[in-house]
Image (spheres, coloured by chain):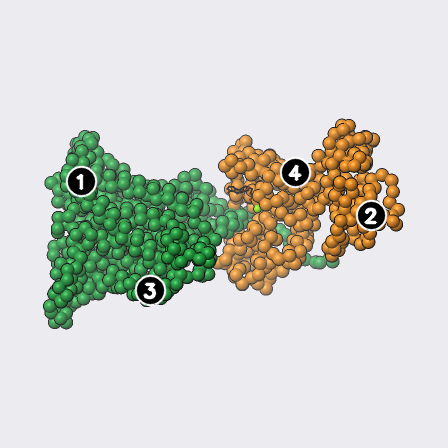
Chain colours: A orange, B green
Amino acid sequence: MPEIHVDSLVKQFGEQRALDDVSFDVAEGELFTLLGPSGCGKSTTLMSIAGFQTPEEGRIEVGGDVFYDAARRVSVPAERRNLGIVFQSYAVWPHMTVFDNLAFPLRVRKTKRAAIRPRVVEVLDLVEMGPYIDRYPHQLSGGQQQRVALARALVYSPSVLLLDEPFSNLDAKLRERARAWVKELQGRLGLTTVFVTHDQDEALSMSDRVAVMSQGEVQQIGTPEEIYRRPTSRFVAEFVGNVNLLTGEVAATERGRIALEIAGGRKLWIDSERAQQPRAQVTVAVRPEALRLEAAETSTLNGSNTLDATVRSVAFLGDHYQYELETGDLSLTAQTPRAVFAERVKVHIPADACAIVE
Amino acid sequence: MAQVTTTTYEPVAPVRRSRSLPTAGSLQWLVWLVVVGLILGPFIPLVYASIRDRPLYEAGGAFTAGAYRDLLSDTAFWHAALHTLEYAALTTTLSVVAGGAIAILVARTDLPWRKALGRLTLLPLLLPSLGIVLGWIVVWGPGGYLSSLVHTHLHLGTLDINTIPGMSVIEATRLLPVAYMTCEAALARADSSLEDAARSAGSSPIRVLRSITIPMLRPALLNSGTLIFTLSIASLGIPLLLGTQHNIQFLSTYLYLQWTNGATPDSPLVSAGAMLLLLVATLLLLLRNRMLGAEARYISVAGKAGRTAMLSLRMWRWPLAIVVALYIVFSTLVPVIGLALMSFVAFLTPLIAPWHLFTWSNWHILGSGIYLRSIEHSALLALIGGLVTTALVALATLVAHRSKLPTRKSLPFVMLYPRAIPGLIIGIGFFWAYLLTGAPGSWLRQGIWGILLAFCIRNLPFAYVVMYPTMARIGEELDRAGRSVGAGWWRTCRSIVLPLLKPALFASFVLMFVEILNDYDPALFLVRPGTEVIGTTMLDTFLQGIVGPVASLAMVQVGVTVIVLAIGTLVLKVRVTGGHDA
Ligand SMILES: Nc1ncnc2c1ncn2[C@@H]1O[C@H](COP(=O)(O)OP(=O)(O)O)[C@@H](O)[C@H]1O
Ligand SMILES: [Mg+2]
């Protein structure tokens, strides 16, 4: 299984810059996700790897083969790239049976007649669609069509799998199952995979690594934990889940941590590897569930990074409670697994849960 | 947890490709060159012929603008131009007003039988126009069956069809479906909630019609009006059959008669006239394209068919339905019945009951000589032309919409162009093209294949207009999927796009068959003894004053057309009329 190198892609649609210096590497066997809001250039990136879009600049290499190199004017046609692609619409050919859909790539490769059926059956079993071999696509549900599309992309053992929002046409229940199932299959086959989605839950739960994109630029690349816990920009912090953003001025610097002066003159200590200029404006991101919340009367919370707050509203969200808090002229959102029955509370903001975003 | 799978994930052999096969790129270029060359190519010799001082087949000669000077200083030319203008303006007004009115009645009111009436309104598009004109002459001409009847029994005059207004009425019935289709489509697309809103705000139905529906239709009316104007400028059949006997000349007949009877045959003057006509037609086409762009900006696509609240006609429902039905009867049915009757009698007159004059001879004569030959030729051309045009246009549509060929964007415009070009210009253009291309040209000129090529090019826009919407509905991811699994461009087209296009291919074939069977005007400039087709034989025979066999020939066209369309709609389930609002 090969690795993928995408280097400085630039793609222009008229005036609009759809890709602006997009670079990333995907390791062998890795499930790599492009995450971002609709229109940020994910599909354009994926289709550039597939060979359906031609960037103006950059370089794409898969498993040692140069697929695209603007400088050397190399562009391998899509059909020679030997990639497996699952399209957003599945693109299962409506005039062919499931068997023919899977046999087509083999026939194109001039596989011996006798070898086609066993291989098709084998791969259909892999996606648990064996019994549907003679059906036409319109006789299948959306989820089943998606499995056929995946099987079709696997039947010729491509070097790399590309998935463009494959779950967006499934209903919520089915989507959850399909995610787990695809992830399991990908791991089992050890397929190098690039996965595109605008759904952060999907990206976090499935990926080995995630690249967050915005307006044609890659904002941050990292493991799901890194992306979630240590976002490097305000955009990433806000796009990947709920977040509290606190802005303050650097008041003190120690080794490995700094103190911010936030609204109301209070001090907030945060861990920081990087040294900061004194009096610099800094914004940090804290996830709501990282905050510790206790009723003010019974609280044992004390010392630094602990604020007194008033509960403005509580919402029960099934597996957790969400609190809108007010402390001075600062608003905070906190989440706890168990209810805190009090109006006056103490909030603790752990120093290691704060990520500097700008 | 540890689920055991026996699957081996072993690589299948990579795509093998033989090097000798032509690449997709060269195939795409070839298609582009053939289409553009065949459509635009014939204009080059036409331009050339118009700026020489003698016909191209004569030795020597020099460049000159003499032909244009002669043409523009010929008073007959200016008379013809004025007549053409009057004729085209009248025709356009009549067909746009009536076509738009029928479209509103069908699409927006509770007119009884509106679906059936709407379909029947489209009939003249598909029936052989030359035959229908002959039907009009048989029935309404001087001494025609109904005009005599009305005259002797009611002592009333009827509209003289040998005048410009009379001819315009006939031309308008032929072209009205173009206006009807465009308006009907626009109304179906448009959001009727605008009208509903005005209704619920208390406007009367007439008020709504005047201040909302008709303004909403304006782009469709302008667009179809321009097309009808172009088509009626170019019309040759009606002016030739009805105008020449009474010395009313039009641009088309002026050029045709100069060509056939002029002092110097095939004179540069005709080519110069054709060039001017081509220029006007092209300008009108460009105007129309700009208007289409504007229309796209105005039409709201939100409209959902079926939930339109219909305007109630109340006491006018039945009278209006009867008016529309009578229009269909008189414009289509009566001429066809007249033709049918004519083909079974020695001569047609209200003074003697037709059964006393019954004869088979008009039909017998079709079994031999020029008549049989024409029928065989037309059938052969329609069959081969239908197949070839469908195949070529399918390829060109694939290149236009499913390739990365740098010049692909020019194809749709080029393929629609012949719709705007008068048939006689195509005829003259191909005449010169064959003359100048040596052996292949002369082979084409000697046989019926030269006529076939001209017919195919003339009618090719219909094939494209039938295919394009279906092609646009085939999602691009379907062929990308084909490419991604290793199939090249042509393999993907062959195995995925073309099979999905099949219904449109059938429709295109049926439409091409019918159009080529009934076409005639380009052939008038290419036909020679032994290569006649039904249309040219009908015209020739009629101009010689023989009517009976012409009627039976026209009935052959009508019969074959109806049968082919019936097979098309019932067996192949195609809807062919969609092609005509090109
Ligand atoms: N063929 C095209 N022509 C013009 N603009 C395009 C085309 N394809 C995509 N774009 C634009 O490029 C941007 C990125 O598109 P895309 O990669 O499809 O976004 P997404 O992240 O939703 O997949 C969008 O703003 C889109 O409008
Ligand atoms: Mg996308």
Judged left or right of residue A249, residue B160 is left
Q: Mark 2 points at which residue?
A: A345
Q: Mark 4 points at which residue?
A: A219
Gap in Å between the C-alphas at discs 3 and 1? 46 Å
Q: Name the residue under label 3.
A: B316
Q: Say which mark, if any, is on residue B78.
A: 1
Measured as percent of width and height from the top left, residue B149 is found at: 14, 65
The residue under the point 44% across, 55% down is: B198
Measured as percent of width and height from the top left, residue B207 is found at: 38, 55
Question: Which amino acid does the dot numbered 1 rest on?
Answer: Trp
Q: Say which mark, if any, is on residue A262.
A: none
Mark 2: secondary structure = strand
Judged left or right of residue A99, residue B394 is left
Judged left or right of residue B486, residue B374 is left
Same chain? Circles 3 and 1: yes
Same chain? Circles 2 and 4: yes
Question: Which amino acid does the dot numbered 4 rest on?
Answer: Gln
The residue under the point 39% across, 63% down is: B312
